[in-house]
Amino acid sequence: MDPQKSAKETPNVTVWGVHLKDATTLTRKEREELLFKLNRIFTFVGTEIPEEIELDGEVIALHEVMWRLINNKRELTPEECAAVQRLWGAIERKIRQIESTIRSQDIDEREALMLYVEAQGLIRAAVELRALEKGKLFNSAQTPSTDRNEAQKRWLSYLKKIS
């Protein structure tokens, strides 16, 4: 395969329902579509939390931090809760920054998709941190059947709302 020929071809890129037609600067419609899909409910499902991310000028091993927090089987101390809140705030600022970049800067398809995937991973981390803060991830008194029953009730409630 000729490397010069493949470099000139327009990639046909699809990421979790996002399809952009050209490798040039994004059109206004493509930006709006990308931002709409990014802000849909459950956009983060199936997305991996980034291994490392720069938040407020500091590189954080986000995947490892999240793994440790989620697998921690004890109640968080007040200091840990404050740290979780600060991390959540930094992640939210980063998500808004990415959205602003997609909305207003001249970026091409590849940059847009990289930002999109990064934002999805950060949204997943933010959702999990919010659940952690509310204590939903640390209720060791519940049995698996109780968890299953509560999950079924939440789904039924959700289905009633959308129908």
Image (cartoon, helix red, strand yellow):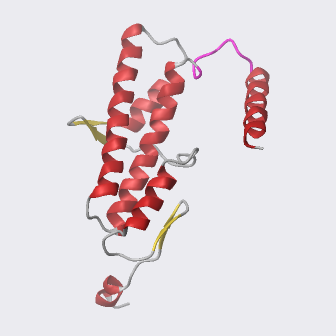
Residue extending farthest left: 57
In the rendered image, is residue 52 in sight?
no
Range drawn in magenta: 136-143
Q: Position of residue 22 (x, y in %)?
A: 39, 77
In the rendered image, is residue 104 in sight?
yes
- In front of the other: 23 or 101: 101
Q: Main secondary structure of the magenta part?
A: loop
Q: Quadrant of the C terminus?
A: top right
Give the number of marks: 0
Residue extending farthest top: 78
**Picture layout, residue 136 above or below residue 95:** above
Residue found 79% across the figure and 34% down from its top: 156
Residue found 39% across the figure and 21% down from its top: 85
**Picture layout, residue 100 above or below residue 128:** below
**Picture layout, residue 16 above or below residue 56:** below
Q: Position of residue 88 (x, y in %)?
A: 39, 29
Q: Quadrant of the N terminus?
A: bottom left
Q: Position of residue 71 (x, y in %)?
A: 52, 25
Residue found 56% across the figure and 17% down from its top: 135
Q: Is residue 65 magenta?
A: no
Q: Position of residue 143 (x, y in %)?
A: 74, 18
85 displayed left or right of 146: left
149 displayed left or right of 10: right
Question: In the picture, residue 126 is in which quadrant?
Answer: top left
- In front of the other: 28 or 115: 28
